[in-house]
Amino acid sequence: MSDTAFRSGFVAIIGRPNVGKSTLLNQVLGEKVVITSDKPQTTRNRVQGIHNLPGAQIVFIDTPGIHKARSQLNIFMLETALSAVKGVDVVLLLVDASSFSGSPDELLLDVLRGLEVPVVLALNKIDLLPKEKLLQVIAAHAGIYPFREIVPISAATGDGVDILVKLLSGLLPEGVPYFPDDILTDLPERFIVAEMIREKVFRMTRDEVPYSTAVTIESFKERPDGLISISAVITVERDSQKGIIIGKKGVMLKKIGRLAREEIEQLLDARVFLELFVKVSKDWRENSRMMKELGYE
């Protein structure tokens, strides 16, 4: 294989919830394509981000965090994560080095067993731990699986990310680009807009409310004057959750809408009129039909 040949392929990013997978992807792309929050299980769907380099194209697949699934929605998320490692060229396992307990994560090791593609381990959040502890974390992981490489990074600051990307590109097979070099994701704008709204709910509410929330785009129209009119529905499972999202005199819903609109305008590079509605679909996370209607299929 020639060192100067063009390389292209797919890299699945896997790991536990809240280890920084989406933050890493956004850092690599230099744009916000995937929503993030400090709450676990923010990502629910398989998301592709496309990174072009001189001589290479990496198609990253961001996945939901691997966890013990209970609800139908969690089972869907777990299946989405596990299916992502099939048919890829490289698997990137992301671990939160700052919270490493000292023992291997058996659930993650079970996922890695039997893989025939290279597995690279990225130890994230190195900005949150002293160097001597980082060396201990590296040593602890070196013997638990034959990783192709172990790379310390900080997805938040970008430290080590360029090194990681260069390593991943070198592991890809020779081939032509899968996508044009001027796009960052194959996701439709409707999906990204819905996710941006859901992110604001995640960031501004607490307890069970974020996890009981789904967002669907009802209409997405460009007016003759260039204004984009978007109507979205926020679905929750309980009347009490609906009350929390709307807030006293509608204050919370207005704030969610304002923050989402500002971000959507940056994404679309246009003025946006955003209208939000909230409805209750009791226990939708346990209902396969409702999940499909809300985009989880």
Image (spheres, grey):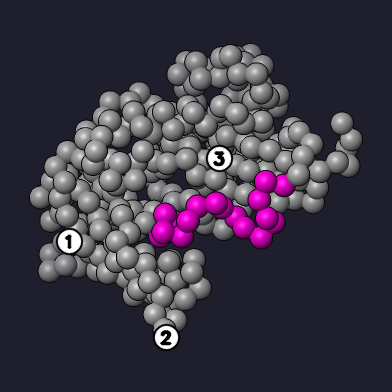
In which quadrant of the rendered view does residue 216 lie? bottom left
Q: Is there any visible trace of residue 211 in the rendered image?
A: no
- For label 1, the crowd category at 10 Å Cα-Cα, with few meaning under 14, some 14 to 19 and many 20 or more, is some
Write the residue at 15% across / 50% down: 280
Residue 192 on the magenta segment: yes
- For label 3, the crowd category at 10 Å Cα-Cα, with few meaning under 14, some 14 to 19 and many 20 or more, is many
The kind of residue on which mark 3 rests is: Ile
Q: Report the span colored magenta.
A: 177-193
Label 1's element? helix
**Residue 43 in picture, x, y percent from top left:** 41, 42
Write the residue at 32% across / 59% down: 217
Residue carrying label 3: 61
Furthest residue toward bottom = 225
- For label 2, the crowd category at 10 Å Cα-Cα, with few meaning under 14, some 14 to 19 and many 20 or more, is few
Q: Note whether 223 is above or below 5 in the view shown.
A: below
Residue carrying label 1: 246
Residue carrying label 2: 225
The kind of residue on which mark 2 rests is: Asp
- Left or right: 67 with respect to 61? left
